[in-house]
Amino acid sequence: MSEIKKRKVHGPDYKAKVGLEAVRGVKTINQIAQEFGVHPVQVGQWKKEILEGSSKLFEGKRGPKPINEHSEPNHLYSEIGKLKM
């Protein structure tokens, strides 16, 4: 019988390293996959995750806060009441 291969479990740091190498675009996906010993499809998936998730790094830093539908009208009514007095 043939020997059963165990699946490799890569940590987030390793995935980021491989994915960033793919994002740089200096080497082809196949070259990166061969260098790091992973399948080219996996390199492409990690690259895609980095590109899609990179915008989340900057969310909430600045800019207007999201409007809460429930608290905003109450706040405005209280302001109107203060202005009438």
Image (tube, rainbow, N blue to C red):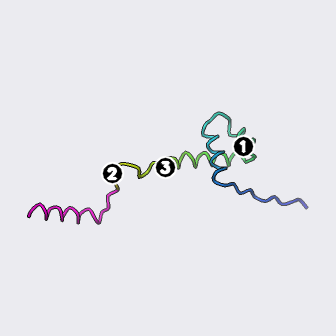
Residue at the far right in the pictured view: 1
First of labels 2, 3 by sequence position: 3
The residue beneath circle 2 is 64
Mark 2–mark 1 Cα distance, whole angstroms, equals: 42 Å
Count of labels in the image: 3
Where does the image place residue 21, in percent across and percent down from the top left? 64, 40
Q: Residue at x 35, y 56 (%)?
A: 66
- The image shows residue 70, relative to residue 24, as above or below, that is below
Magenta residues: mostly which secondary structure?
A: helix
Residue 69 is a magenta residue: yes
How many other residues sit within 10 Å of disc 1, few (<14), some (14-19) or many (≥20)? some
Q: In the image, which is nearer the foreground, mark 3 or mark 1?
A: 3
Residue placed under numbered mark 3 in the picture: 57
Q: In which quadrant will I find the C terminus?
A: bottom left
Foreground residue among 62 and 43 = 62
C-alpha distance separating marks 2 and 3: 17 Å
